[in-house]
Amino acid sequence: MNLHLSNLEIIVRLLLSVFCSGLIGFNREQKNHSAGIRTHILVCVGACIVAMIQKEIGFNSLMMAAKYPRFSGVIRADEARLIAQVVSGVGFLGAGTILVHHQVVRGLTTAASLWTVAGLGLAIGMGNYNIAIAGTIVIFLVLGVLKRVLHITPVKKIMIQYRHRKETKEFIQNYFDEHNITVRDVNFNVDQSDADNHIYTNVYDIELPSKINYADIIEDISMNENIMSIRMISV
């Protein structure tokens, strides 16, 4: 019985890891995310290589135990040791793709996809092809199809401070109407800095269409000269 991976099997596993992770990476690169097809492939192939090394360590331990039975009690090969390091290590790589810009968190899905393709690489490297192929299909469906099936409207809460109540309120409302932004609720507050100037504070609960970016809303509204401050409020 051959306890080592053949050259053909190594090549097949590496090519399968390239194919599976390439599908996931292609989806991310199409949507212009920070980690694209090459990053996903490298993560998956790297995990596959580590898993195959772990397999070889296990095979070598079995051969040593068979060759030297008196040492079989002290020979150990933990198949989860290197795999555990990959799972935790890819977490740091994924964290590097998460960005916070204008209090908006981006890159969570890309970080998650990197972590999952590492899992695909481990499954392929360990020879669990059915798990790898089924996992690839599920991940691809989640990234490419689920968003089209489930129409979830994100709700945000923003606070806007401004002057010149009438014209600025009209500008804000017109902006919301033009971009199909639904205002679910709004709270008003007025601060009088002196006898002639009033500072108005509105807190809006808004529903965003799927194609509009929250950071763009902040930037567009802040361009108005009457806007003094605009920021997201955590809920």
Image: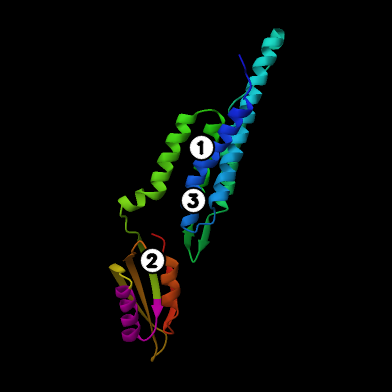
Q: Which residue is mark 3?
A: 26
Which amino acid is tagged 1? Answer: Leu
Q: Is residue 109 visible?
A: no
- In this view, the residue in front, 95 or 7, is 7
Measured Cα–Cα span from mark 3 to mark 1: 16 Å
Q: Which residue is mark 1?
A: 120
Magenta region includes residue 113 = no
Which amino acid is tagged 3? Answer: Phe
Measured Cα–Cα span from mark 1 to mark 2: 32 Å
Q: Is residue 209 left or right of residue 130?
A: left
Measured Cα–Cα span from mark 3 to mark 2: 22 Å
Q: Quadrant of residue 191?
A: bottom left
* Residue numbers of the magenta segment: 161-178
Q: Quadrant of residue 179?
A: bottom left
Q: Is residue 134 above or below residue 149?
A: above
Query: Which numbered tag is attached to residue 212?
Result: 2
Q: Is residue 210 left or right of residue 107?
A: left
